[in-house]
Image: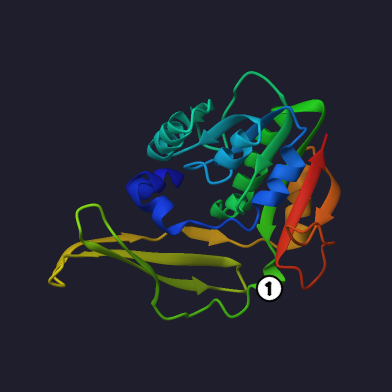
Amino acid sequence: MLNNYDRIADLYDLYVTADYDLKFWEKECRDAGDVLEVTAGTGRVTLPLLRAGVRITAVDVSLAQLKKLRDKAGEAGLEVETHRADMRDFDLGRTFPTVIIPFQSLEELTEPCDVTAALRRVRAHLAPEGRAIITLHNAAMQNGREGQALQLVNEWELKNGNRQLFWISRRYNPVSGIGKSYQLYEEYDVDGVLHKKRLFSPSYRVYQEADIRARIESAGLRVTNAWGGYDHSPLGEESCYMIFELRL
């Protein structure tokens, strides 16, 4: 299901350049010892943590994205342990003092039972005195995402001299909480002739706070902190995010 990211691993770093949460993760993981990062992707969060001296074990379902992560780490003289695995079903045979699922990645699990399964895997890999941090969007702030027209997000020049355009449109149902992102990649030559077009359309689900708290409890975890933003602001109705610190 999630390994569709293999198909755009070569493009991912070109358009995913967000850094709004990096200071948060550096602060939370600075003295954490070994960190297990679930859904590490190509290393948007992993690499800054490695540079800060944090030891990371990275898990992701996309083999192609993990290869990019290892390549980038190697070029920077950094070491990272990687494992290809589905976040709903993996066993590394050891526990960690800190487990993180950044970038609202749990929302790619559109079935609530899959969220519970992923959280149970977090619990299984959490040391007795350890903690986990998961991040999600706040469903109350997602209105207005339904029916957006196709919009040009960015464009860049490729190594072959061609031009890449990145378009996106979202469809979101606030009743079900389920949405779909239509990501269109077009490659044009210097004469404006279309050479390649690629469509990536992942689904996602934005969970209500009560539902995600129920999933956390059902996985055998408890909430010890709840923030509404990456500035550690308290979680409230108008918060953009739901960030939970979890313990056994």
Colour theme: rainbow
Task: Tell me the element at label 1.
Answer: helix
Q: Nearer the viewer, residue 51 or 172?
A: 51
Which percent across, then down, holds residue 142? 63, 73
Measured along the vertical axis of the image, is residue 54 above or below residue 7? above
> Residue 219: in sight, yes or no?
no
Q: Could you say which quadrant of the image residue 3 lies in?
A: top left
Tell me if 82 is positioned left or right of 218 in this view.
left
Tell me if 217 is positioned left or right of 100 in this view.
right
Name which residue type carries label 1.
Met
Characterize the local packing of mark 1: few (<14), some (14-19) or many (20 or more) Cα atoms within 10 angstroms: some
Which percent across, then down, holds residue 23? 69, 50
Q: Could you say which quadrant of the image residue 233 lies in?
A: bottom right
Tell me if 213 is positioned left or right of 17 in this view.
right
Measured along the vertical axis of the image, is residue 159 above or below residue 87? below
Task: Tell me which residue sits at (60%, 52%) in the image.
Answer: 103
Which percent across, then down, holds residue 189? 16, 65
Q: Nearer the viewer, residue 107 or 40?
A: 40
- How many numbered discs? 1
Task: Tell me which residue sits at (53%, 59%) in the image.
Answer: 204
Task: Tell me which residue sits at (70%, 43%) in the image.
Answer: 26
Which percent across, then down, holds residue 146? 52, 78
> Residue 199: in sight, yes or no?
yes
Q: Nearer the viewer, residue 118 or 44?
A: 44
The residue that disc 1 covers is 141
Task: Tell me which residue sits at (73%, 38%) in the image.
Answer: 29
Tell me if 82 is positioned left or right of 115 in this view.
left
Measured along the vertical axis of the image, is residue 53 above or below residue 199? above
